[in-house]
Amino acid sequence: MLRARLGDDIYTSWFNALEFESFDGGTVRFSVPVKFLRTWIQSHYSEDLLDCCRAEFKGAEKVEVALRQPGNQAAARVEAAPAPSEQAAALRNNAQPDAAQRNTTFVAPAPAGRTSVGGFEGSPLDPRYTFESFVVGPSNRMAHAGATQVAETALGGVPGFNPLYLHSAVGLGKTHLLHAIAWEVKRRSPNAQVLYLTAERFRYQFVEALRSQDPLAFKEKFRDINVLLIDDLEFMHGERTEQEFDHIINSLLDGGRQVVVASARAPNHVERLNERMRSRLQRGLVTEIATLDYELRLKVLETRLAEKRALDPSFTLGREIISLLAERLTESGRELEGAITRLYATWQYMRTAITPDVAETVIRDLVQGLEPRRIKIEDILRIVSRHFGVSKGDLLSQRRHRSVVWPRQIGMYLAKQLTARSLPEIGRRFGNRDHTTVLHAIRKIEGELSGNPRLKEELEELKRLLSH
């Protein structure tokens, strides 16, 4: 009856593992082997299941779905597996599972590698992010070519592109290429002094050096570096941190050492850079990674599917599903990778073929336009703070410096554009300001928009970030 009601695809995907346990005259009890399946059935099909039970069991008023009591170690391991949201994160760094465990559990990820120079540890490197796993297309070919040449010539006396500056929106491959350069240089020259740092870790290490009153020792750690890779430059904030960063970069470039920088914005759009540093970064190769086109999205999906099939050859997705994902997921490579990971996790639980209906259900929150996200002022404060490199406290404070006032005005403008909040409510959420202050901010941004195409692009970028 349930199969006839829901259809073969849904029944096979979600109810094959459901087993009847008992009926006490009022409650029908079933069991499933994993928590994910129980949660899904309860949230999506509890009414359908109850209706069918009422037709079979006289007096049935309630349905309960429990986790099956493990009768063996395999069931126990499945029960201990992470919840779906945790599963996707765990799969990203998952090592290849032991063949004996492949159907029941996941192997804990191996520790990510780190570069290190003179005992100074860099940020973690992902072993999957190599040139071999990077999918090349029209939107990223120049960036890939530049990164490849840097990796090949960094230790050759005269670096090919120095500095190399990569910029793009989130999830398009900047970090992948930085990691690939680090791995390739170390492969070619195991003794090379390579350091990969996020801007956040650079700042943290420098602040720690200031606290220990040893900033000179911090500077000395960079003296012998052959290749320095800096990620997320837009988050390099703090006056003394910025000054130290300028000194180190200039010293390395003057000494002919290779520098690679990645950021969400081009050098002339990173407000915190002084003119000298902006000029130095623009002297080498500055290249943007554009949004992936349909053909490249297909290639990314096929590559990530092949990686999962290398773990388990029995996992497969039909061409119509790959095409569906490529058409609907248009924002980034991470989004595409996340979709494959979710479908792989679902398949490991269900052990049945993934149909287009199941695929669309599993990735529903990734697909643009199905469920528009409600934007909150708290989201705007968070994204604006991150984008401009100012703290949320500064945005809410009474500080009047332009570096704070401008992001605050943009935040108020976005709050009016993207939420249903009134001007007084927006003012209250932005540090208890009067509604006239909010109105002034909105008019200020609107006045700038007509003659400032760069501001228009920046607002579109912020809106895109908020929509996710």
Image (cartoon, rainbow, N blue to C red):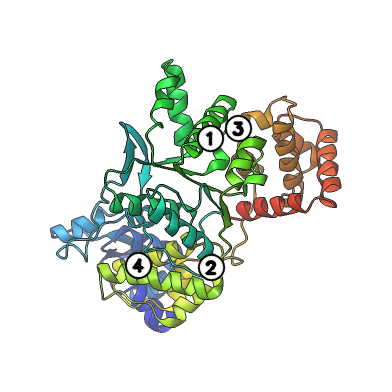
Query: In the rendered structure, which disc, 3 or 2, sits on the residue that comes first in sequence?
Result: 2
Q: Which residue sits at x=26%, y=63%? A: 33
Residue 27 to residue 396: above or below: below
Query: In the rendered structure, which disc, 2 or 4, sits on the residue that comes first in sequence?
Result: 2
Left or right of residue 184, residue 400 in this image: right
> Can residue 126 be seen at all in this image of the molecule?
no
Query: In the rendered structure, which disc, 3 or 1, sits on the residue that comes first in sequence?
Result: 1
Q: CA distance from mark 3 to mark 2?
A: 32 Å
Q: Amino acid at mark 2?
A: Leu
Tell me the SS state at disc 3. Answer: loop
**Position of residue 152 measured from the top left corner of the image (x, y, whole percent):** 38, 56
Q: CA distance from mark 3 to mark 1?
A: 28 Å
Mark 3 sits on what residue? 391
Mark 4 sits on what residue? 344
Is there a contact, CB below 8 Å, between mark 1 and mark 4?
A: no
Is there a contact, CB below 8 Å, between mark 3 and mark 1?
A: no
Q: Amino acid at mark 1?
A: Asn
- Which label belongs to residue 250? 1
Mark 2 sits on what residue? 329
Left or right of residue 315, residue 340 in this image: right
